[in-house]
Image (spheres, rainbow, N blue to C red):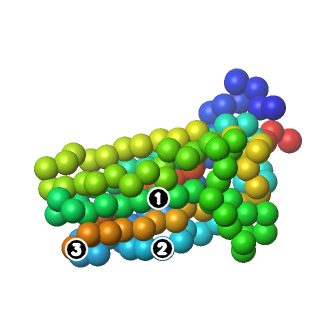
């Protein structure tokens, strides 16, 4: 286990998914993020989601976290691993402020690879933002 005194040098942040440029008219689309290898991480990790509001009241965006043993066959993360809070659809509209959510994941219980899956719905869904994983790298 990494000592607290080595936290600043052991912390690593990796992008799980980012939307196109802010000038994009589509933003996030239904897509699978790229698998991130968790082999060099330990303990608890943090999923950070930072999403801008959509332009219509009926727009929703849903993110689901998945893990995999082989970076090929992914399945939704189980409750034991955590991070299920991001799997809830959240409606954003023009009056909404920037939305930030986070979830904790137990890297020791997750399978080797982690990715995020995005689904959008509504008349003209357009969201921008990013989703990242922050974790502690193993000290060797």
Q: Earlier in the sequence, mark 2 or mark 1?
A: 2
Instruction: Determine whether the residue tagged by mark 3 lies in a helix, strand or loop.
Output: loop
Which percent across, then down, holds residue 24? 27, 74
Name the image quarter holding the C terminus.
top right
Label 1 belongs to which residue? Answer: 63
Q: Residues within 10 Å of mark 2 (few under 14, many from 20)?
A: few
Q: Earlier in the sequence, mark 2 or mark 3?
A: 2
The numbered mark at residue 36 is none
Residue at 22% in and 73% down: 124
Residue at 46% in and 66% down: 118
Instruction: Determine whether the residue tagged by mark 1 lies in a helix, strand or loop.
Output: strand
Judging depth in this view, the residue of 87 and 128 nearest the camera is: 87
Judging depth in this view, the residue of 4 and 43 nearest the camera is: 43
Which percent across, then down, holds residue 127? 30, 63
Instruction: Determine whether the residue tagged by mark 2 lies in a helix, strand or loop.
Output: strand
Label 3 belongs to which residue? Answer: 124
| Identity of the residue furthest to the right in this view | 140
Figure disc tally:
3
Judging depth in this view, the residue of 33 and 62 nearest the camera is: 62
Label 2 belongs to which residue? Answer: 31
Q: Residues within 10 Å of mark 3 (few under 14, many from 20)?
A: some
User: Pointer 2 and pointer 3: residues touching (CB < 8 Å)?
Assistant: no
- How far, Cα to Cα, is label 2 from label 3? 16 Å
Drawn side of residue 77 relative to residue 99, left or right? right
- How far, Cα to Cα, is label 2 from label 1? 10 Å
Image quarter of residue 137: top right
Q: Residues within 10 Å of mark 1 (few under 14, many from 20)?
A: many
Residue at 43% in and 73% down: 30
Drawn side of residue 15 relative to residue 35, left or right? left
């Amino acid at each position: 286990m990494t000592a607290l005194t080595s936290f600043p040098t052991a912390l690593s942040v990796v992008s799980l998914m980012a939307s196109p440029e802010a000038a994009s008219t589509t933003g996030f689309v239904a897509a699978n993020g790229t698998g991130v290898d968790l082999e060099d991480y330990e303990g608890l990790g943090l999923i950070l989601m930072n999403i801008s509001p959509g332009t219509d009241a009926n727009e929703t965006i849903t993110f689901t976290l998945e893990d995999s043993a082989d970076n090929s066959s992914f399945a939704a993360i189980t409750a034991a691993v955590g991070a299920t809070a991001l799997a809830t659809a959240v409606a954003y509209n023009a009056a909404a402020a920037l939305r930030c959510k986070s979830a904790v994941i137990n890297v020791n219980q997750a399978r080797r690879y982690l990715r995020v899956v995005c689904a959008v719905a509504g008349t003209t869904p357009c969201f921008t933002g990013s989703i990242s994983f922050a974790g502690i790298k193993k000290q060797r």
